[in-house]
Image (cartoon, grey):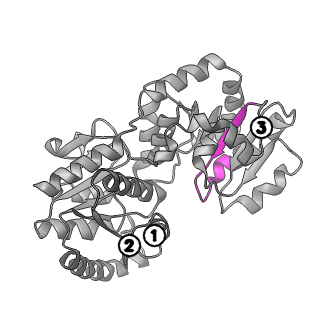
Amino acid sequence: MRVIISGGGTGGHVYPAIAIANALKANYPGTEFLFVGAKGKLEMEKVPQAGYKIEGLWISGLQRKLTLRNLSFPFKLISSLWKCRGILKRFKPDVVVGVGGYASGPLVKLATLMGIPALIQEQNSYAGMTNRMLATPATKICVAYPGMEKVFPKEKITFTGNPVRSDIIGATARRTEGLKHFGLDPNKPTLFIMGGSLGARSINEAIVANLDLLKDGKIQVLWQAGRLYIDEFKPKVADLPNVKIIAFIDKMELAYALGDVVISRAGALSISELCLVGSPVILVPSPNVTGDHQTHNAMALVQQNAAILIRDSEAKEVLLKRAIELLQNQSERQTLSNQILTLGRPDAANEIAAQVADLAKQ
């Protein structure tokens, strides 16, 4: 079987793509892979690190308002389509997989025009622009949330959940290892704050505005401030030994193992991982995303009593106080943990791999 996986731009697209490839490699030995991404984006670094070949396209998104950047879009699209044509003719895939993001658009569209079956995977409860455009030519659409027939043809949809890294499953069993890795106290409850690899300014500011709540040292904090903000916020907690602030976390499975309560943005990948870990979580959706899709993602959990939602605009006033209240309420934490675990889809990557293999046979 020969498979091209295209898309990326953010970790929410890249890591599911890698998880799908890993599942295909494990379940269908001998499968050959090629990734297609956007030059300068995260996939160009992370895919080779995972052991897969990737080719980059000169492509970027079309801005939703009139900007100078949009003037170059037609040229980038023509360039990408031309390169995709060469890639498809040379690699001769049995099936192509689009995971969303700029690069999946031209590759999947051209593949379907050439008669190659295509599967697209939508991570969010609010479908991205690229996948919306690819819904008609795609053969199969794998989704992570119910109700997606509002935007996709119902007969093409398969509910699989989001594929996540295999080391996330069973992360809570590694608590002792996590405490040692991050140098934390095994006798204190832990609040884990994550704002993504770049960071989330509003979450960071909400913590700093309420540091008095942490000065008694009764709880400890593992705080991923993000690469953009670490230099700004690290000095502010220099006199708080119970607060460990870092820019980026490579060993996410160990961080998840520690979180008695987690504060997080509501990206699709983060939510899918939290559903497998079972952490009691407070979600603070980013207001700076297309279609406010993080709020849609968060509400899917809130409606099942599986998470707490705090609006970005309210974070400075209530976020840390609510997190500490939750740390002190064992019963509420247990309810949230039990409910979020029911939403986990640990076999998502294998289910998607099976769908890919089925398309290849056809």
User: Which tag, 3 or 1, sits closer to the chain's start?
Assistant: 1
Callout 1 crowding tier (Cα within 10 Å): few <14, some 14–19, many ≥20: few
Q: Point out the image quarter for the C terminus.
A: bottom left
Q: Classify 292 as above or below 118.
A: above
Q: Where does the magenta region start and end?
A: 189-205
Q: Point out the image quarter for the N terminus.
A: bottom left
Callout 2 crowding tier (Cα within 10 Å): few <14, some 14–19, many ≥20: many
Q: CA distance from mark 2 to mark 3?
A: 41 Å
Q: Classify 160 as above or below 47.
A: above
Amino acid type assigned to the residue bearing label 1 in the image:
Pro
The kind of secondary structure element at disc 3 is strand
Q: Quadrant of residue 107?
A: bottom left
User: Which tag, 2 or 1, sits closer to the chain's start?
Assistant: 1
The location of residue 175, given as percent across then percent down, is 65, 36
Observer-nearest of 341 and 319: 341
The location of residue 121, given as percent across then percent down, is 30, 52
Q: Residue at x 39, y 72 (%)?
A: 38
User: Which tag, 2 or 3, sits closer to the chain's start?
Assistant: 2
Residue 310 visible in the displayed image: no
Residue denoted by label 2: 54
Residue denoted by label 3: 220
Amino acid type assigned to the residue bearing label 2 in the image:
Ile
Residue 234 visible in the displayed image: yes
Q: Which mark is residue 119?
A: none
Tag 3–tag 1 contact (CB < 8 Å):
no
Residue denoted by label 1: 48
Tag 2–tag 1 contact (CB < 8 Å):
yes
Tell me: 298 left or right of 31: right
